[in-house]
Amino acid sequence: MKPSSKHLLLYLIIVFIFLGCSSVKTVPFENYVDTKTKKTHAQVIKTYNLENKGVYVSNEFDCARLNGVKQLNDSTAVLDIYPENSPINNSAYFAFKAWSNTPKDFYFEFKYPIGYKHRYVPKVKRNNVWKAVDSSQIFRNDSIVTVKLSLDKEPIVVAAQELQSSKDVKKWYTNLIKGKEDYVRLESFGSTTLGRNLPVLDIYRGNPEGKELIVLLTRQHPPEVTGFFAFQEFLKTVLGDSALSEEFLNTYRVLAFPIMNPDGVDLGHWRHNANGVDTNRDWSKYNQPEIKQAVKYITEKVKQDKNKIVLGLDFHSTWHDVFYTNKIRENTTFPNFIDDWFTALEKEIPGYKVNEASGNSTKPVSKGWFLYGHNAVGITYEIGDKTPKDKIKRMGRVSATEMMKILIKR
Ligand SMILES: [Zn+2]
């Protein structure tokens, strides 16, 4: 064999070993969901100038969702709001800017495709402050919802939930981890279809080797901002200047993923990523870049540092606060965690009653991946669309504190 072909052979062997090491195990589920890339419809990005009225409506910003505007009469316009593709959950998300040359009240009627209906109470951002529109300014005629807004030349943002774009999220975690560089490492686990960065915080004190691992996920579903607020408070508490946090991070390692679907978030999607797919149905075969790279990143850390995943929390929003848990507890890494955690939450939050919905995941969602793929406790941590911020913050704070206490005592 000539030296050059010897080198080639050696090179090929190294490539194969490398590919072998970095390949990740798929996890079978009872009901496989097709998560191959699907067609999406892009919204036309523009500012609409309502004829002769001096009123403007725009979707020229991150997280906007507005597919068309039709003037109905002197004081009313109909807003077309479409999802990125269908079928899709009824997360009828909207976000637009509006302003007027002269101060005036104006009515906006929401129009969704057949089969979808208005879900979110509109929130308005004025002078940098978000406020839900008062119910006296919201009118319902059967399923048609109209909102009355006071406009002037200063644009207001009107949205289904407070906006938290990928840039806002980056600003938040950059600020959060300042001065904590000795135990929080900001890394990237890859990039999205549209080239957006996928950030992850790798959190532990001392040596990562042999530590048990907790995984925190959020923003798989773009409009689920209330779940993200709980994630923020949860993570802030885990990173807090407390003896509890210090002891916890001496023992455990946390991988926190603050924005799993930045393309979907910035494109103002109702649920899917840029490839038109629900990433929280992709935790079986990893067809989508966000999940594929997250799983690869987690798997490599676990292998490299001999970690074991004990707990995975995935923060979402739905109609009301609820914890979706797995029924299978025996023989998992931590059979008593859920009972102990919920008991502690009820004890620490006066008048609070845990709402648990228990079932074993049959579709490829993250909580099933933690269970079937790692024998770990997996929980979908859901905050209600309308849960007030002070309650969300308390939940985030107390649930993080009690988690740390339980894990330390283990
Ligand atoms: Zn969700």
Image: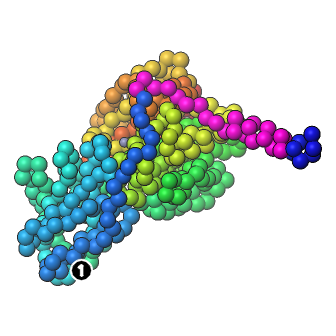
Question: For the magenta stretch, what is the residue range?
Answer: 8-31
Tell me residue 317's x, y (percent): 34, 44
Which residue in the structure is indicated by mark 1? 153
Tell me residue 146's x, y (percent): 13, 59
State the residue at coordinates (75%, 36%): 17
Tell me residue 270's x, y (percent): 32, 50
Quick check: is 30 in the magenta stretch?
Answer: yes
State the residue at coordinates (53%, 22%): 332
Compared to residue 116, the image places residue 181 above or below, namely: below
State the residue at coordinates (9%, 56%): 139
Tell me residue 238's x, y (percent): 53, 45
Decide if residue 302 is in sight here. Answer: yes
- Asked if residue 192 lies left or right of residue 98, the reply is right
Looking at this view, is 409 or 88 the one in front?
A: 88
Q: Quadrant of residue 30?
A: top left
Decide if residue 237 is in sight here. Answer: no
Compared to residue 92, the image places residue 42 above or below, namely: below
- Asked if residue 100 lies left or right of residue 240, the reply is left
